[in-house]
Amino acid sequence: MGTDDGLLSGVRIIEFSMLGPAAITTALADLGADVIKVEPPQGDYVRRMTWPIVEGTSLMHLHVNRGKRSLTLDLRTDAGVALALDLIREADVVVEAMRPGGLARRGLTFERMQSVNPRIVQCTISGYGMTGPYETLASHGIAYDAWAGIFEPAIDDHGYPTIPNHVSIGINAAPLFGGLGILAAVIRARETGTGCAMEIAQSDAAAAFDWYRSESFKAYERPQSEVTGNAADNYERRAPAIAGMRGGVRYQVYASADGHVLFMASEQHFWKSFCAAVDRSDMFERWPGSEYGDHARGNLEMQAELTTIFAARTTAEWVRFGIDVDVPIAPVNTPQTLPDDPQFAARFSWIPRERLGADQLPFPVMIEGREPLVPTKAPEVGEHTDAVLADVLGLDAAAIAALREQGALG
């Protein structure tokens, strides 16, 4: 639950969630908000979804629901709906993290929530949002990346199209955009006494996160007289974003003696410093390049020279070189090797499995003068039902027992 020393201490969120969209409140719980996860009596089956399964519980549940409290309600009963309204009366935010309209169909419309709490903020997170022809289309996480053009299908060993390895954008970006919207709405509601309803689609979030490519294509619909490439390319229009890096030489991946590095000397002063430091000022004299953004595209002779140079040192030696000479060089890690990187070790402290059931990464924003909060383990179904009803609504054991008799708690 939220803690007194968290930045969001005093913010209470009632979350009706199923599966991965519950991530919309994970960071808010990490920052100290009291997030009460309301579940149907049978619970959220995210605990059994995806892989890995850690000692019987999915890593997804252990991560996205960490720091939250679980309460079971049966919203098919009048008593369950009434109890939900009592909780909403004492809250700042209601999150609907499931197909949109689920709460309204059970009588929990935004208008009814406002009638008991005018400053309530409701946020619905869903696959394709609450409008448009895809509103009711069933979906899972990769659908939003496919829809937004995040990846191109790969071909497997049998010649069939397949999902390529990629970072899932929609399911990760939507909680960030949604959390930002929630906090903005809470600030306004506390100033004015009036809340609002908002929604975010995971598909929209994928498109918005990848704005650079979509906006570049849109810009290129205008005539060449209005939209060009940059001066280093003689104003030739490059393909948007990373695709435009193909053929680059001064900005490219090179094999080191024990792995790979990313070399990024596209500014002339970086390129000059690099050449001098490896005792190859002749390369700068021959190919000085433009002042900014010159990747020396297609210069295979230069690429061959750099290939030989980079192969002579280890990745760690090249990173040290970049620090000493002030040249941008990055190690090329994988998700598996990243924790061994010294920069990762200096910045991240794993939250240990003994605390959360699985080793997990902390909230990445560091606050000066404060140690990061360590969230509690993701809850079992209904683990905190009695505690929430007692400390939020002040109910005693007899009142809670009566609610169980009425079927409100399942």
Image (spheres, rainbow, N blue to C red):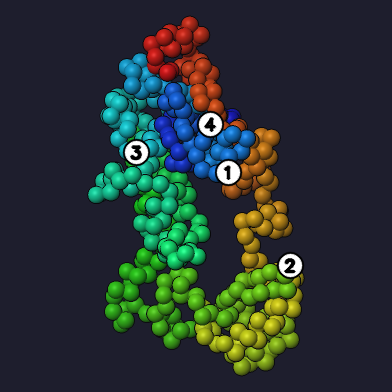
Q: Position of residue 13 (x, y in %)?
A: 45, 31
The numbered dot on residue 52 is 1
Q: Secondary structure at mark 1?
A: loop
Q: Which dot, 1 or 2, sits closer to the camera?
A: 1
Q: Which residue is mark 2?
A: 316
Q: Residue furthest left?
A: 133
Q: Earlier in the sequence, mark 1 or mark 2?
A: 1
Q: Earlier in the sequence, mark 4 or mark 3?
A: 4
Q: Which residue is mark 4?
A: 68
Q: Position of residue 170 (x, y in %)?
A: 43, 51
Callout 3 crowding tier (Cα within 10 Å): few <14, some 14–19, many ≥20: many
Q: CA distance from mark 4 to mark 1?
A: 21 Å
Q: Earlier in the sequence, mark 2 or mark 4?
A: 4
Is residue 380 visible from the viewing direction of this image?
A: yes
Q: CA distance from mark 2 to mark 3?
A: 48 Å
Closest to the observer, 369 or 283 = 283
Q: Residue furthest top?
A: 398
Q: CA distance from mark 4 to mark 3?
A: 21 Å
Residue type at the position of mark 4? Lys
Q: Secondary structure at mark 2?
A: helix
Residues at circles 2 and 3 in contact by the CB criterion of under 8 Å: no
Callout 2 crowding tier (Cα within 10 Å): few <14, some 14–19, many ≥20: some
Residue type at the position of mark 3? Arg
Residues at circles 4 and 1 in contact by the CB criterion of under 8 Å: no
